[in-house]
Amino acid sequence: MIKSNNTSKYAWLVVALLWIVAFLNYLDRILITSMRDPIVADFSLNDAQFGLLTAVFLWSYGIFSPFGGFIADKYSRKKTIVFSVMVWSVVTLWTGYTTSFEEMLLTRFLMGISEACYIPAGLALITDYHRGKTRSLATGLHMSGLYAGLALGGIGGYIAELWGWRSGFHIFGAFGVAYALLLLVLLKDYKAPIEEKENDVPVEADKITAIGALRALFNVSSFYILLFYFAILGMVNWLVNGWLPTFLKDHFNLNLGEAGLSATGYIQIGSFVGVVLGGVLADRWTRKNEKGRLYMLIIGFTLGAPFLFLMASTAVMGIAIIAMMVFGLARGFNDANLMPILRQVADARYIATGYGVLNFLSTIVGGLMVYVGGAMKDANVNLSIVYQFAAVVLLVATWCLFFIRFKKKDA
């Protein structure tokens, strides 16, 4: 483990190393949505079955997220991250060789389990290294890797048209396996010096237990508010991630490649701006007001949710593009600040576990809604109605965050 007095430059190297992991994390999971048509044709699927491919991933991802977070808290952030990257990359490679719908369901289930270990461990490691002055910015920069993965995931439609849908899984799966080996060499767990042993720094592993983690988290009333908010956010995000390419293709008469890149690209442009701007402003605001990060998040979706509603309502592609970018900006504000907010609410010994629990509820709800979206489409219910409803619920959930009370000041 590396000593903290040598971590100034290394703290940013950790962000850079994990940025690529975040990129692969979302690219590998989202490739399938922009390749819908050839996969549906290859396996003779209906929309509900195709939605089930994403839903199964999300359900396994959600169920195992608390376990992945607990392993990172109990043992090693680094080992958890390396294991996660290696396994999901092997599964991505395998996906390109599947020969049946049932086999693809299995690969999506296994990808969910393996990816469940990463985000809680990765965000916990970054916020171990980065304290109050850089915490939101560092978190936001890392999360921009997810956006890059989502944006490039949209290119799956073009890959499918040029070389077949299996090629993308082969290429990115092989790269991930090689990168996991590089992380094994370069990535290091954080070790705090004695003078920093306080309630915002991980403690000895033998003091961390599963029962203790659950008791500590669920004894905090504000954690329940975060759970409700994160569940709604998961519902909205995965309706967007899972069905927006199809919505744009049908609603604006785009081809497969145009719909895939439009659905990911414009939102990610806004999100890239949002994580940097939201991170910098929140770090500065928090120096004067401990709720600065919270207010930054609330401002984001108070603005972004109505624009999601607008995107679903307009018949003009130019207006939809602007709406997607503003929604992306709001999502960036959220992603830069949610983990830092959790560190102000929950016991620091169980930060990765806490984020895993949030992911659990979020992705279970998200997976259900992806499946429901497909079923509703099969029933000829317009996806615009689904997005309008999601926007209203997101706005309500965002305003519930005003009731959060912090246990400690940001460090």
Image (cartoon, helix red, strand yellow):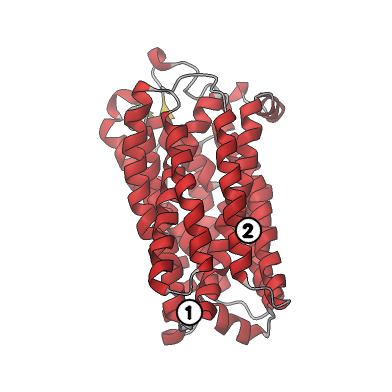
The residue depicted at 53 percent of the width and 67 percent of the height is 313
Q: Is residue 159 visible?
A: no
The disc at residue 118 is: none
The residue depicted at 49 percent of the width and 70 percent of the height is 314
Placement of 194 over or under 211, stated as above or below: above
Name the residue tied to disc 1. Answer: 252
- Could you say which is closer to the camera, residue 349 or residue 325? 325
Q: Which quadrant, please, contains the C terminus?
A: top left
Q: Amino acid at mark 1?
A: Phe
- Left or right for 160, reference 63: left
- Could you say which is closer to the camera, residue 106 or residue 57? 57
Name the residue tied to disc 2. Answer: 389
Mark 2, other Cα within 10 Å: few <14 / some 14–19 / many ≥20:
some
Give the x, y percent position of residue 369: 67, 60
Q: Earlier in the sequence, mark 2 or mark 1?
A: 1
Placement of 155 over or under 224, stated as above or below: below
Q: Quadrant of residue 378?
A: bottom right
Q: Amino acid at mark 2?
A: Phe
- Could you say which is closer to the camera, residue 206 or residue 358? 358
At mark 1, the secondary structure is helix
Placement of 203 over or under 233, stated as above or below: above
Disc 2 to disc 1, C-alpha distance: 20 Å
The residue depicted at 57 percent of the width and 70 percent of the height is 94
Q: Is residue 276 visible?
A: yes
Give the x, y percent position of residue 11: 32, 35
- Left or right for 333, reference 9: right
- Could you say which is closer to the camera, residue 162 or residue 377? 377
